[in-house]
Image: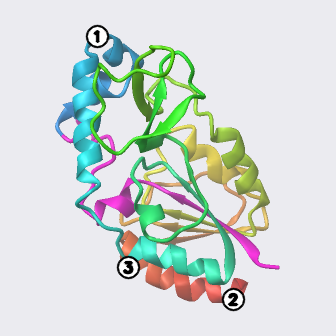
Amino acid sequence: MKKKLVVLTGAGISAESGIKTFRDADGLWEGYDVMEVATPEGWSRNPELVLDFYNQRRRQLRDVQPNAAHLGLARLEEYFDVRIITQNVDNLHEKGGSSNVLHLHGELLKVRSVKNPGHVLDWHGDLLLSDKDEQGFQLRPHIVWFGEEVPALEEAVYLTNEADVVAVIGTSLQVYPAAGLVSYSRPEVPVFYIDPKPAPIYGLPNKLEIIAMSATKGMELLDEKLKMYR
């Protein structure tokens, strides 16, 4: 039976493909105030602005490709039961060939009803104010905005607790609740943390190894280190 490898990924793994999916220090996301485009309040104030923002992000996905880190994670499925838990809303893990991807913060290529959150649809074009569900309620981006609950968190905690090996790639570990996931790994489980500017991790009893590299370079080293756990 293959060992369970759980990989928590953040904006750093997508950045090397040309996507900025993170909140910068100045509070901007691709030049937009995150409070205007990534909160329920922003949606209430100006839904057209919010829809336009995510329409632009959705179009961007047509022109970007998975990088070596995405492809490397997909190849690891040959040796491990790989479960990816990503903070990213892009589809680069799926395009790279990964089979099991859990999106904590939603997905750009899906929309949902404002009235029925469980009514989720695949969506690849622009989303407009005229787009409604079967009952006539507005469709909105299937994105977890600041201040909203993270529906996938319980499953993410379960997967992390079941892992035999944990890897963290391209995340500052500053955005909660995702940042707290690694603490749910069992004490004896090795944790590999890949980031060019790794954040300090306190109180983690695990066997932690920091790889201060970019996602693509760090993935090459991780591949070597994981050979002993196959």
Badge 2 or badge 1: first in the primary sequence: 1
Whether residue 6 is situated above or below residue 43 in the rendered picture: below
Residue type, numbered disc 2: Met
Mark 3 nearby-residue class (10 Å; few <14, some 14–19, many ≥20): some
Residue 203 visible to an observer of this rendering: no
Q: Secondary structure at mark 2?
A: helix
Tell me the amino acid under the disc marked 1. Answer: Arg
Label 1: which secondary element = helix
- At 57% from the left and 27% from the top, the residue drawn is 149
Of the residues tagged 2 and 1, which is closer to the observer? 1
Residue 80 can be seen in this image? yes
Q: Residue beneath label 3, please? A: 217
CA–CA distance in space, label 2 to label 1: 53 Å
Amino acid on which the number 3 mark rests in the picture: Lys
Residue 228, labelled with which disc? 2
Q: Is 126 situated above or below 157? A: above
The x, y position of residue 47, in whole percent, is 29, 18
Of 127 and 65, which appears nearest the observer?
127
Q: Position of residue 97 (x, y in %)?
A: 49, 71
Q: Residue at x 29, y 42 (%)?
A: 125
